[in-house]
Image (cartoon, rainbow, N blue to C red):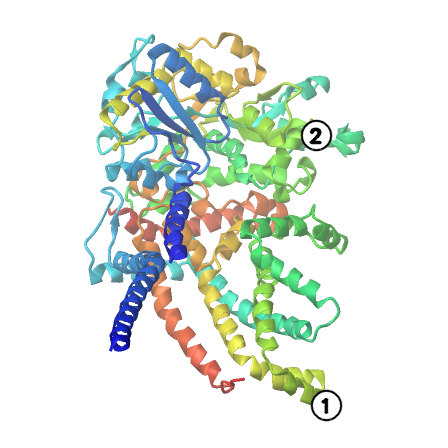
Amino acid sequence: MKKKLLILPLMALTVGTVTGCNKNSVAPRSGSSLMVCVYDGGYGTEWIKQVALDYEAKTGVHVEWAADQNILTRLQTDLKSPSYDIYMSHDISWQSYAAQGLLEPLDDLYESEVEGTGKTFKQRLTSGAAEISKFNDHYYKSCYTLGAGGFVYNVDLFEQHNWNIPTTYDELTSLCQTIVAADIPVGAGGLNSLVPIAWSSTEFYWDYPVFEWWAQLAGLEKIEKWKSMQGTDGKNSTGYQVYDPNGNYKEFIQAYEMWYNLIALNHSFSNNNPQDTVLNNACALFASGQAAMIPYAQWAKWEIQSNSGTQFTFDIAMMKTPRANSSVTTDYNYNVGFGDSIIVGKNIPEESKVMAKDFIRYLAGKEACKTFVEKARGAFLAFDYSIVDLGDLLNDKYIASVYSKLTTCTQFNLVSTAQIAIVNASAIMPWIDNDYYYAKAFAKPSDYTPSVIGAAIYSSAQKSWPSWMQRAGVHD
Amino acid sequence: MTRIVESEETSQKKRKNRRFRIKTSSVFVFVMLIYSVLHFLVMWVGVNANSILLSFKTYDFFTGTYTDPSFENFISNLKMIFYNIDNNVNHYKDMLLSSLAFFIVSCFVTLPIALFFSYFIFKKILANGFFKVIFFLPSIIPLIILTTVFSISVGSKGPVGQLLTQMGLQPENFFIEDKSAQWMIWIFCVWAGIGYDVILLTAGMSRIPRDILESCKMDGVPTFKEFLYIVIPLTWSTITTLFIFGMMSVFTVFLQPFYLAPAAQSTWTIGTHIYFEARGGIALNEPATMGIFYSLIGAPIIVGARALMNRFFKEVSY
C-alpha cells in the first residue's frame, strides 16, 4: 500500500520534470525587459550582444536575446503565445502570419523619426525595402539585411602572384587557367595544388554570381517581368511563360551556361569532388589558402572562419562579379537575403510592443548600423548607409569591398510580391521546386546541359502552374 | 456463540478489507492508465480525426483561415493530388514510385536476407552472438547518425568510397544524381533494416520445439530442407508480421531519403512529402488529404495481404 502511494508522487515528479525540461524556455518577462530572438547563422551573435548592451546603456531597457537555429520550425506556434517580442530570420512566412493576426502592424514605426538621422524609419530603409514589407495595406515587418554576393577571393594571394581582379568573364576563365597551370603547392607539406575555386554541396552559393550574370545579360526590366509572374498577355494563368528559355528566361539559361562552361566542363577549376564536399570543408580549403576564390555572400568572413575553425591570416575581399561580355556596361549586386525579416508578435504585452518598435527603430540609427557591420564582419543591415560614418571599418578590405558592391553597383533582388509566388515560395523561384543543378551538372555534365535545364524548368513550371494558382487562390 | 459472532465480525472485516483493496487497486490502475489513454485519445484519435476533417477543407493563405468542411472541398483537394501525380508536380509521381519501391525492398530483399541470416544465427554458427549485435546496432542508433555515417563511409572520402573508387566507380556522385541516390537509399534501408527483422525472426525460430529439430537431425534432413519445410512454416506468423511491416514501409519510410539525398527530390516518399508540407504549418488540408487518400488505398491492401498470407500455412501452436 505504501509502495503504491509512493509511486503516484514519483510519477507526477517524473512527468513534471520531463515536461519542464525545455532548454528553450525563456525567463519570465519583467516590465523593463525586451526579448529578442535571432536566427543563429552567418552573422554570429556578437552583433546582437553589442547592440543589446548599447541599447540598454542608452535607454535602460534590458534586452534578453537568444540565437536559435531552429526558430523557423516552431515560429508559427511560438507566435500564438510568443516567448520573444522580436524575431529576426530568413524564410519567415510573414504574410501568412499577418493574415492570421499573429503580427503587430508596424505602420507607426515606419512613420516615426529615427533619432540622429532626421529621417523617418521608412526613409531610413534601403530602396525597395518598404514596398516588399507591406501586406493588406499595413507594414508587418522590416527588412533585415542588405545583402551582397559573388566571388570572395584571397587578396594576399592575388597580390603575391600579381593576378589582376578579373573584370570580365573571359578574364575569370583565363585566371582559373593560370592558377591551374601554375600548380602552386599548398597545404601541409605542399602536397596539394592551389585550386581556383572551392565550393561544396551547399551549391546554392553559386546563385550569387549566376544571378548577377543573369541581371547583366537580361537587364532589370526582364527580371521585374519575371517577378510579376504574369504571361506575355498580362494574365496570371500564363505566368509560367516567364520561365520560357526562348523568351523571358533566355538570359537566365545563358547565365547558367556561363557557369556550366566555367565549372561543369572544367573540373580542374574546382576542388576535388565539390559535389561530395560539405560546406565546412570548402570553407577550410579557402581559409587555409588552398583555394583562391569561393562563391559566398556577405556573411563570408564570419561564417568561413566559424565553419573552418581557422582565423584568416590573410585579407579577403568580395570582387564585383566579372561582366559577362563586352556589351555589359553595368555592374549589378544581387541583394542576397533581401526577403529576410524582423517581425514583432501581436500577442505580447502592449508595453513590450512599444519597446520592440523602439529597438527596431534604434537598429535604423547610425550607431547600430555601424555596430552590425563591425561585429557581423562585413554584413549590412537593410538601411541607407550613406549617412553612416563607417570610418575605420573601411580599412578592412572585406568590409570595404562589400560596401563598394552595395554603393557602386546597381542593386536588385528577386523578392516577388505576386500572390502566386508568396504562397508557393519554395517552388516558385529561379530554380523551380528548389531543384538545383550545379552539383548534378558537375557530376554528369552531359545530362544537365543548359538546353536540357531550360526545357526542364519550363516544362515543370508549365505543368505545375494550375496547381500553384489553385493553392494561391489566383485567377485571371 | 462467541465464536460465531467473532466469525461474523471477522468475515465482515475481511469483506470490508477486500472491497477496500479492490477500490484502491482500481484507483491505482486508473491512475496508471489515464495518461496512456489520454495520450492515445489526443495523439491518435484526435490527430487523425482532425486530419480527416482538414481533408474536407481548403485554406485561404491571405486570410489565414480554413473554409468550412464540405464534400466539394474534399473532391477539390483530391483532384489537385491526381493532377499533381499526373503532371509530376513537385515530384508527386516520382514520390509514388519511390514509395512503392520500398514494398519490394522491404518484403523481397530485406526480409529474405534477414531470414537467411536469422537461420544461421539460430543454428549457432561461429560468432553468432557477435553477428546478432552487428545486425541489431543500426536499429538502436539514431537515424541521423546512421545516415551521416553511411553517406560519409560510402562517399569519396570514406573507406568504402575509396575502395569503390579503386574499382573504377564514382562514389562522389552517388548521392547527387537521382538514380544513384535512389539505389544508395535502398541499400541503406536494407542494411539498416535487416537487424530488426533478424531479432524478431531468431526469437520466432527459438520457439521451435527442440525435439522437432532433433528428429530432423536424426532423420538426416539436409539444412536447406529443414529451413524450407520446417523452420519457415513454424515461424510463418512472424514472417507474415514482418511482411506486413514491410508493406507499411511504403508509408513509414520518410526521413531516410531526406537525410541521405536532400537534393534528389525524386527519391522522396509519400511520408517525406507529407512531413515537409505539414512542417510549414499552413495549408494542412493538402498533406491531410494525401494521408487520407493513401490510407484508404493502403489499408485494405495490407489487411487483404495479411489474410492471404495466413492461408499459406495453418497457425501452429507449440
**Residue A283 vs residue A213, the one in the foreground:** A283
Determine whether B91 is above or below A99 in the image.
below
Q: Marks 2 and 1, how far apart in space?
A: 71 Å
**Residue B251 vs residue A457, the one in the foreground:** B251
Residue sitting at x 37%, y 70%: B297
Residue sitting at x 25%, y 53%: B58
Residue sitting at x 61%, y 83%: B209
**Residue A436 vs residue B248, the one in the foreground:** B248
Q: Position of residue A9 (x, y in %)?
A: 37, 49
**Residue B148 vs residue A249, the one in the foreground:** B148
Q: Position of residue A197 (x, y in %)?
A: 64, 32
Q: Are marks 2 and 1 in contact (CB under 8 Å)?
A: no
Determine whether A75 is above or below A118 in the image.
below
Q: Position of residue B33 (x, y in %)?
A: 35, 60
Q: Secondary structure at mark 1?
A: helix
Label 1 marks a residue whose chain is B
